[in-house]
Image (cartoon, coloured by chain):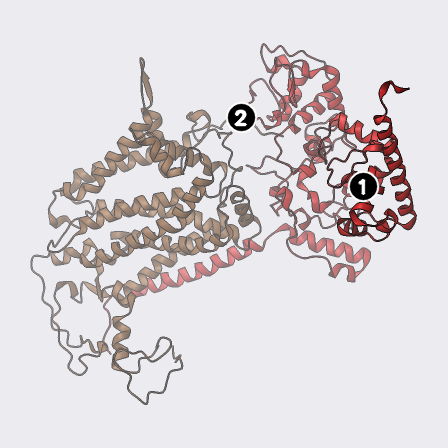
Chain colours: A brown, B red
Amino acid sequence: MAMRLPSFSRTKPEAPGVHVDRLWSFRPQSDREAGDAIVSNFLLHWFPAKISKASMAWSYSFWLGTISAALFFLLILSGLPLLFLYVPSVERAYQSVKDIEFVVTFGSWIRAVHRIGAHLMVIAVVLHLVRVFLTGAYKNGVGRGQHREQNWVIGVVMLLTTLFLSFTGYLLPWDQLAFWAVTVGTNIASSIPGVGPQVRELLIGGRTIEQATLIRFYVLHIVVLPLLLGVLFAYHMWRVRKDGGLARSDREGLLAQPRVTEVVATKTYTLLGVARGAAPTVTARTLEAADTTVNAVPDLVRRAAIAILGTIALVSIMSVFIASPLEEPANALITPNPAKAPWYFLWLQEIVTDTTFTVGSVTVNGAFVGGVLLPGFLLTVLTLWPWLDRSAAAVTGLWLPRERRTQNLVFFLLILAVLGLTFIGMVLRGPYWNIYWPWEAWSDIPTRI
Amino acid sequence: MEKRTNSPYPAVDRVVMALIGVVLVIGTGLFVWADREHDWRYYQFEFRRQVAEKFGADKAVILPHGVQQIWVADLGRADRCITCHQATSYPGFENAEQPWRTHPVEPLKTHPLEDYGCTSCHGGQGWAIDTAAAHGEVAHWEEPLLSRSLGEAYTLAGDKNALLQMNCNACHRYDRETKGAGAINLAKQMVNEKGCRACHVINGFGGTIGPDLTEVGEKPPEQYDFSRLSGQRTTFAWHVAHLKDPRALTEGTVMPNFNFSTEQAQSLAMLMLSWRRYDLPSRYVAGAPRTDPRSAEELAAEAAMKTGPGGWFVQTGCFVCHSVAALGVKSPAQIGPDLSTAVEDVQSRFGMTLDTFLANPTGTMSVVLSRQIILTPEQKQTAIQKLREAFAEHQRQRGAAATPAGSH
């Protein structure tokens, strides 16, 4: 890029700290400018200078965190045009979504990108959590100064924020699907003993799902939750750097005999403009060793670009072929049969169904067991797991080590159970919440005319 | 130069990166294509060709391009039907194939497109611009196009287009008879003849043996029992079957079998489905009163004033403000003084004769007589004469009242 933006003549030396150009410099004119360019470059500080090959491997992390972040970025990007088109009022929301679908240029594609991106983000974030658990990446490998367990907790909060973001977005089209999914979801919340009804009232801003609910969910969806997730994301990334990178790279530091490599004579910091001509020589040790690491630029950057652009390409193409549903306008008087929660809550709805039963004259309230007690317990254990896991630091960043076999197995079975219940709720539950096998047709849904 | 990396990745990663670039370009092409691909482009092209052929190229070039709509703010309808049906109000294509046919002129005279749009009569999904979605032949759209082919699917006994009349009755619900809505008129006649109200409440009155039918059209299909119905599983089909043989569909019902003909049963089913909770602006409701309701006494009193001795004051509009008690005219507002004594009164109030005052009025009357009640010189003469008559009558009445009752 040979572009040079116009600048003032440099007859006088500029005062320290003053950048005389009105825009950026693309070609440094002085050592100071060169140094500033490096020091103030965000991307160069996000990534380390060097990264271990092992932590860059596709097969270690599957890059699920990057993919989640890419989807979050894509959701913000596709959400912006929707902000101009969608009207958060019960009278006009449905109509504005119809207009987005039918007559806005690229409208149905943008909406599909937003919807598919949101569903994929829930999947990617959950898979990311599963990967981190199975590799024990919440553990402190090297130990001193690391706080990976805190980043795990941040991650769990980010998963919940992602779910809530998706859930608040679910209501906005104001169709039957939205209305009843939110009805089912918030009814589960109301089964918390004691404060349930109040929690539901706080959530939906009244006792029925109405304009107050819509504007509440809307503001949460477009301002509060994205902001929260953005801040948590920044902190999450910062902690990854401060904890020494991915847990996998700790393996290098844990080698019994760190290999001291030869002095890298050309390793200089001249770009900083502080030591021109007097480059300090650095003895590279293990982590920086040439045979186990690569430069972040371009190798890491290129891989990140592959993950991000690949995600965007996938969502873009899926959005051409998968139409977003928009059912009948929301109607509080007509309950669709069956009425289902959003798919990522269907395992809870399924547990609610299965734990509601009557023995003699006693009815067990499934909504409390399945909607509050069980998920609350699972979430608490999940959050506290880094402190409950007593395995050695040596297995940090290893896929399925023998030492963590039991916990990984239990975790894996729990995940399978959740997936199984989600499958039952999504695919097998039909009218009247009866089980329909995939090859059985649901009874015809009658129409008016 | 320094060997920057010993990375084994670039060879593969560069290729992957390049492939993703290609996929991104393909993806962009795909969504641009998907956004442009619509049947209306062909329909507009074809209509332009037909217009050019029939009326010349200069008429064809001025036809509108792109998505068209009729926005009826009062009804919240944006009907984009005219994107394909461009001939709707373009005379000369009365016998063309759809979607290029001219709409019959007669119904549009009383139901202009800009006030009613298309879907308020025809049904369908006005927002959509693709055939299947626009005609409502898609999931999650419950107002299909009430077309001839739908009527044929139901093998309607009478007019195959009759389903459309259900939507007429949204506004014409309280009409006894609606021009052009033969099936609905027949059904309304049935309702009265067969005495449906013996058992059912309709529009607020009737018996309570059967369910209230006032808004039966709103009852969702999910709430009907279709287990004994064969054939189409729709509310309409259910009602037709139920009207023809109530017991066949509802076990133990006391509703008698009226031996309706197919046409009668179908008409009644249409009427029932048209009884919905429409949220219509009042100006769309046929027969809704446009004035404040007045009692019979008020109407009788006004009629008496108009034909009585003071009729002239009523017709001219003086009575809006002035009573003329001597002639039996009573103003509803009584803002101005009673005109029975105007001959005297004008002299004492304004210091001029009635003739002078009416020729050059002052105060409020100058405004009224220049803007609201504009009288020709002849009419002013009439006014003076009428006022004198009123004064004479006033004096006669006072004289009669002053005379003791037993003196003659």
**Residue in front for this viewpoint, A247 or B82:** B82
Residue B25 to residue B171: above or below: below
Q: Is residue A144 visible?
A: yes
Check the residue under mark 1 and report the chain it is in. Answer: B
Percent across and percent down for residue B79 are 65, 46
Circle 2 is placed at which residue position? Answer: B222
The number of numbered badges drawn on the structure is 2
Check the residue under mark 2 and report the chain it is in. Answer: B
The three-letter amino acid code for the residue at tag 1 is: Cys
Q: Is residue B64 left or right of residue A426?
A: right
Residue B318 - label: 1
Q: Earlier in the sequence, mark 1 or mark 2?
A: 2
Do labels 1 and 2 touch, CB within 8 Å?
A: no
Q: Is residue B101 left or right of residue B379?
A: left
Return the residue found at the far bottom: A11
Percent across and percent down for residue A161 are 32, 46
Residue at left offset 33%, top offset 36% = A419
Q: Is residue B51 left or right of residue B122?
A: right
Percent across and percent down for residue A138 are 19, 48
Residue at left offset 85%, top offset 42% = B343
For marks 1 and 2, give the CA distance. Answer: 63 Å
Q: Is residue B261 visible?
A: no
Name the quadrant of the N terminus of chain B: bottom left
Residue B308, quarter of the rendered image? top right
Residue B235 to residue A77: above or below: above
